[in-house]
Each structure stands twice: as C-alpha cells, then as structure tokens.
Image (cartoon, rainbow, N blue to C red):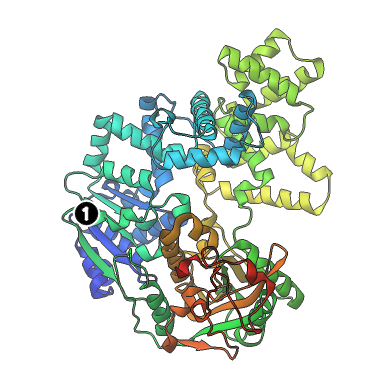
Amino acid sequence: MNNINKLIDNLNKEQKEAVLNTEGPNLIVAGAGSGKTRVLTTRVIHIINEKKAWANQILCVTFTNKAAKEMQSRVMNYIKGSSNSVSWLGTFHSISVKFLRRHAEALGYKSNFTILDTDDQKKLVRNIIKSENLDAKKFSPQLILYHIDQWKNKGLLPKDIKNEKSSAILKAVLKVYDIYQKKTKDLNAFDFGDLILFCVKLFEEHKDIRKIYQNNFKYILVDEFQDTNYIQNKWLNLLVNQSENICCVGDDDQSIYSWRGAEIKNFLTFDQIYKNCKIFKLEQNYRSTKNILQTASSLISNNSNRVGKKLWSSAKEGESVKLNCYKTGKEEAQGISDIIEHSLKKKYSLNEVSILVRAIYQTREFEERFLQLGIGYRVLGGIKFYERAEIKDAVSYLRIINQKRDDLALERVIGSPKRGIGESTLKQIYLFAGKNNLCLEDSIMKILEMDDFKPKIKTTLKQLMALIQKWRKVSRNMKHYDLLKLVLDESGYSSMLKNKKDLENENRLENLKELLRAMQDYENLQNFLEHVALATSADQEWEGAKINLMTMHGAKGLEFDVVFLPGWEEGLFPHQKSLEEKGDFALEEERRLAYVGITRAKKEAYISFAMKRAYHGDWMDALPSRFVSEIPDESVEKNEINFDKTVEDFEFNQDNSIEFDEEYRSPGWDRYKKNKFLKWKK
C-alpha cells in the first residue's frame, strides 16, 4: 500500500490528475518523453489497488508485445499475486485472438484456427491468380494484398464493397478478395487483418457476446491512441459500456502512420464522440534538454490540426541543436562520421548514437563511410527473426502438427527439406482437394489409399504422413521444444544443414538453436505459435556497441543520447511523393515526423542537409527543407557554410523556372518548375 502511495506521490501534478481521475471518458495528451507509460501503468495499479475493478475487468491495449510485457511487469511489481495479472493486457491483435478462440464457432470457424503470415497470404493469392488466369504482371500478390488490407482496415468484407464505379483492375481485385476469404475459411484460418475485423463482426452480429464483455470490462485503457485506424477505433467503441470508462493516451503530434491506415481524426474527435470527456495534458518532458524541446515545439506549432501543447523541461538548456550544411550527400556522411569519431565517441556509447533518415536508401553512404573507418553500426529494420527461412520451415512443421487443416504449412513442410515432390504432384493433390472439399493432408491420405501416386512419390508421402501423425500423437505428452528437436532430427532438416558445412548453414543452425531457447518461454505449443504470428519488429534485441541507423518511422518510441537527422532537403524531407499524393495533410504528417525525429534526442541533436545529392544516378541540386526555416534561431547553432538562401530568396521566371547565382546554379534545376518540386510555394 505504502509503495503504491509513494508511486503516486512521485508523479507531477498533471500526471497525478490523469491517474486519479478514473471515471468517465478521458483523453491524456502526452507529449514526447512526458512519462505516458508510467501514467498508464500507475492508473492500472491505482484502479486495482482501490478495488474499483479486478485485474481481469480491465482491458488495456498497447501497440507492441514489448510494451505489453513491460506494463504487465510493472503492474505485477506493485500488485502481488497471480490473480492480479492483467489478463486482458496486450495488442489489438493478441486480444482479438483471445476473443476469437472463445467464440470462433459463432462466426463459422473452429477454435484451433491458424493465423496466416505474409508469406502464407502471398502463396494463397498467387494460387488464386493462377486459377483465375489473371495477368501475373498486372496483378501481383503485393498489390492485391495491399487493397485487401485497405478494405479490412475500413471494416469491409467483399459483400460490403460496392464496385459499380470501380475500375476493371479493382473489380478483378475484389473478385480475388472474395475467393481469398472463402479459401481462408476453408483453411480454418485468419490473416492479421481478419483478427480485428472479425471481432468487430462478432460484436456487431452477436449482441449477447458483446454484452458479456461490456459488462466485464469496467475500465478500458488504450496506449498510442493516435496510431489507431478505423477498424481498431470501432473495435474499442463496441466494447465501451454505459459508464464510458475509456481512457486513451497518446500524442497527436506523433501521428506518423497514415500509410498504415492510422487516422489522426480518431484522436482529434475523441471529445466530440464522448461528450463528457476530460482532457489532461502532459507537457513536462523528462527526456530532452530545453534547446532540443524548444526546437521541436517551434517546428510542430506550424501544424494546424492538433490539440495543442508546449513541451517544457526543468533540465538544463543543454547543447544548442547543430544545423549543418554540406556540399554533397557524401560529404554529409563524412562530416557526421567525423563528429562521431572525434567528439562523441569520447562522451557516449555508440549504442546511444542514432542516425535517423527519411528514406532507407539514405543509409548507404553512412554504411560505406563506417566500414572505411571501422566504426560498428547496425541497420535496424532488416529481416526479422521469425521471417528467416529456416525459422519459417520449423514453425510450419509445428503448425501442421497443431492443426491438420493448415494446407499452407503442409505445403512448406513437403518442400523443406526437398523430397522430390514438384509442382505437378502438388497440383494433383490440390485438384483432388478442391473436388472433394478436403484439406491437403486428407487428400494425400485418400490418394495414397487409391494408389494414384507414382511409386517414389507414394513412398515419400507415406513416410511423411506417418511422421506427422506420430508427432501429433507424441505432442500431447511432450514439451513443445522437445517436440521440435524430435521433428528437426526425424524430418532430416537438421541433417540437411549439417551436411553442407558453410557459414550460411552454420548461421541457420544457430538460429534454430535460438528458436528452441525462445520456445521455452511459452507454456504450450499454441501459445508459442500465437507469439510467432504476432511478433513485431519493435521487439528485437540489440547487442554490442554500434551506431544505430534507421528511418524516423522506425525510431518512434525509442530514445538516444545523440541523434543525427540528415537529408533535410525539399523533395526528400518533406517527401515530394507524399506531398503530391496528399497535399497539406501529408505536409503536416511530415512535420510530425520531424518532431518525432528531434524528440528522440536526450542530450544532442544534429540536423543537416546537402546542397547537392546523388539520386537515381543523377546529381540533383537541393534547397534546404522548409522545416529548417521553422526552427528558432535562439536554440540553434549554424555552421560556417552559408545556407541562408531558401526558396523565398529566388525569383521565378514567367515559365516558373528559377535563376540562380553561379554558386547555386546547376543544369539539374532547369527541370524543376514552381508547380512541381516547389509546389508548396504557391
């Protein structure tokens, strides 16, 4: 009890108000580094401690498994006893899985459904493209899945989409979507988009089920609310009961994921939907120096679509934000590496230094420079652990053992290791399955009974089917990680890697060992398989002292002692393609991205741009980003190179071209017109 009182007493005035006002709809506008996770966690602890609700009567939604794990750990530190574990704390997807496992039958599915990953989806769509004789060049799986995902984010199943005015391409995509949904149902499977969408359908179509959860959840708390999309917001609204005890935490100034479907209007209109809403603003920043905050706050104040707040800190003024101009992108990489090598390495661990770019291709010049100097670095955002081929192979074995209708897993198992079974045999099995409405495994068993396979294929498939059935049987009494060891040995998969001794296969074996270690953290096979399906890129761990290279999008939620923000040039940042597609809406999102980038820095921030940059093989002259002119002079230190000329300093000719002094002039500029690259000047 004393510990909890002390926890609350240690909050600042605004944080305390946000924690103690538990009733009714609340919106907590939490600036970068203002302790929002602490507030959200303390609020949960306070609700349980004051016996306003049992732990299992609180629904707490986060955006990553890592955040959920951290919150659960903090709660359990203060509220002792396993009964006080917040069982409904997790991501939208993981909580949706729990709903669907309980009520799958109400939607016509079985409770042991499979969750399809991206590769499974592509394979399924590719098969549909073939069967429908669609042009594979015109209809790529990526294009079709993009549209399917967009529809699902808007809560639309094929029957909900009106296509009278659609193009021929969209009509064809819609037909694929319809077949795709029927196929996933036949497989007793959901994809990621289905998990939330089908929960919404469940609650809309079965009011009795919805009522169970509305009565149970006395309090709903949502983290990173600015990142929710339409279907996630609807999911939340359906679970709110008459008391409207919903508390959403987030920062409208950090809404940077519209390309994933996030809708900032969910945040901006929250107080219009919930009329008695109380708004709490957390403006005291505990992360950055005053100069860094002043720079970020001045920049973001140029946005009009925001709740409005101004970050402040009781910390020191700190170092001025450095604003550097370089002649070329290559010189920018050299200049930044020199600062790290000669100044920062003495003061900070390289793990605490990060270079944040707008586009991932910008990392190349930095990588080459760091290799030259022998400085360690990591590019964050590479292949995730669970997306590596050998891991997917191993997981496919576990998936088919867990659920025999998982055709996509079985197809991968048949080919890993290679067993001499090609496309023609798979086609034979799929055709038989389609005609007889059977899953792949049952089809193989029937064709074996009918003796319709060639002798060699018959022997191979008979052995594989016997092994799968044996593994399924032993899985009931064997630990899931011991089961995988057995599978890897008996399937010949381990031998395949061991027999070909090279670095790549050694790494694959090490990855499989790591997988076996990871499995021990999960209670059973189904829990582990759910974790694999729901794992996110933000959950990876880092080792060794290395500079971090990543996109600004990828850096959200992270913090570093020193942050470099290169490439602040018109067309690159703000990004020209975004501006052309979405105009002012995109400009505000790009500015929010700049705000996110600056506020990742705790002690030092460096912003830079180049006067010339190589792009697609051509040298392009560049102008400083408009964001540079929005940064206050008093918090910034400019380097000795003259970069004060911005687009306003140049005269437009009648044909909208620009005349430059010799210092600025280059043939590249002749291609730029006022209404294109410099469209914002209008």
Residue 485 place in picture, x, y as percent: 66, 40
* Residue under pointer 1: 272
Identify the secondary structure beneath mark 1.
helix
Residue drawn at x 46%, y 42% is 150
Q: Quadrant of residue 209?
A: top left
Decide which of 322, 317 is in the foreground and name it: 322
- Is residue 178 at all visible to an observer of this figure? yes
Q: Residue furthest top?
A: 450
Q: Is residue 502 left or right of residue 41?
A: right
Decide which of 628, 97 is in the foreground and name it: 628
Q: Is residue 654 left or right of residue 108?
A: right
Above or below, comparing residue 605 to residue 263 in the picture = below
Q: Is residue 453 left or right of residue 67?
A: right
- Is residue 192 at all visible to an observer of this figure? no
Q: Quadrant of residue 202?
A: top left
Crowd tier of the residue under label 1, counting other residues whose Cα lies within 10 Å: few below 14, some 14–19, many 20 or above:
few
Residue drawn at x 34%, y 66% is 36
Residue 51 place in picture, x, y as percent: 20, 54
Residue drawn at x 16%, y 48% is 243
Q: How many marks?
A: 1
Q: Residue furthest front?
A: 654
Residue 634 place in picture, x, y as percent: 42, 89
Residue 296 place in picture, x, y as percent: 42, 76
Above or below, comparing residue 661 to residue 211 in the picture = below
Quarter occupied by the C terminus: bottom left
Above or below, comparing residue 6 to residue 416 in the picture = below
Residue drawn at x 22%, y 50% is 273
Quarter occupied by the N terminus: bottom left
Q: Is residue 543 left or right of residue 35?
A: right
Q: Amino acid at mark 1?
A: Gln
